[in-house]
Structure formats: structure tokens, C-alpha cells
Amino acid sequence: MKVISTSNGEFQVGVVFGHPDYEKSDWVNLRIKKNSHEGECAYFPQHFYKPARSTPIPVPNQNHLHLQVWNGKMTAYVNGKLVMKDEGVPEDVEMRNS
């Protein structure tokens, strides 16, 4: 993921699993953020709800994401740093190849 430009240096990027919808909570996402409120971090919330925890990581303008999904569990590395390991996907999130 490479951020081309921002007006203030803040951004967020991510990967969504399921079908994003503000009215439903049957989707999850891995987000990488750099902003003045949360700092530089990554987290894995269901819907857009604030996660129980976030992982502080350095977030430059170019980032490498390694994501593994296996048997309903996700493990993710951002820039070589483990940000989540064997996180369960809620049962109501439909995981399928597209």
C-alpha cells in the first residue's frame, strides 16, 4: 500500500472482509492508521466500531501488508511487525473467494 499524497499527512488504509454496510455488522476490516488522534497503529474491528485494542506500529507512506486467513483465523504483519495473530472471524461474517 502506498499513499500518494494527503493534505495533512494523515491517512488510513485497510482491507475489508464481508460486505461493508453501516446498517449491518457482519463484516470486519484490518485498518492501518496515521493521524493526530490515534497516532500510528493497526487494528482489526468488526464494522466501524472501535476495537478493544490497537497495535502501535510505525506507519510510513509506503507499507507492506502480509495477511493470512486460514481455518477462520487471521494473522497479519505490517512492515514485518506482527499486528494480529490467529484472530477469529465472527461467525456472521461471510468469508468467500471472489
Image (cartoon, grey):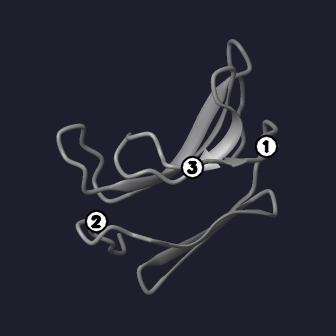
The kind of secondary structure element at disc 1 is: loop
Inter-mark Cα distance, 3 to 2: 20 Å
Q: In this view of the protein, which residue sits in the foreground, 71 or 55? A: 55
Residue 97 locus on image (x, y percent): 36, 75
Q: Which mark is residue 28?
A: none
Amino acid type, label 2 = Val
The residue most toward the bottom is 71
Counting residues from the start of the chain, the first of labels 2 and 1 encountered is 1
The vertical placement of 37 against 69, above or below, is above
* Residue that appears at 44% across and 50% down: 45
User: Of callouts 3 and 1, which one flags the residue occurring earlier in the amino acid sequence?
Assistant: 3
* Count of residue discs: 3
Q: Which mark is residue 62?
A: 1
Above or below, comparing residue 12 to residue 73 in the picture: above
Res 66 visible? no
Disc 3 target residue: 53
Residue 93: assigned label: 2
In the depicted structure, whether residue 6 falls above or below residue 80: above
Dot 3: element? loop
Residue 32 percent location from the top left of the image: 63, 44
Quarter occupied by residue 36? top right
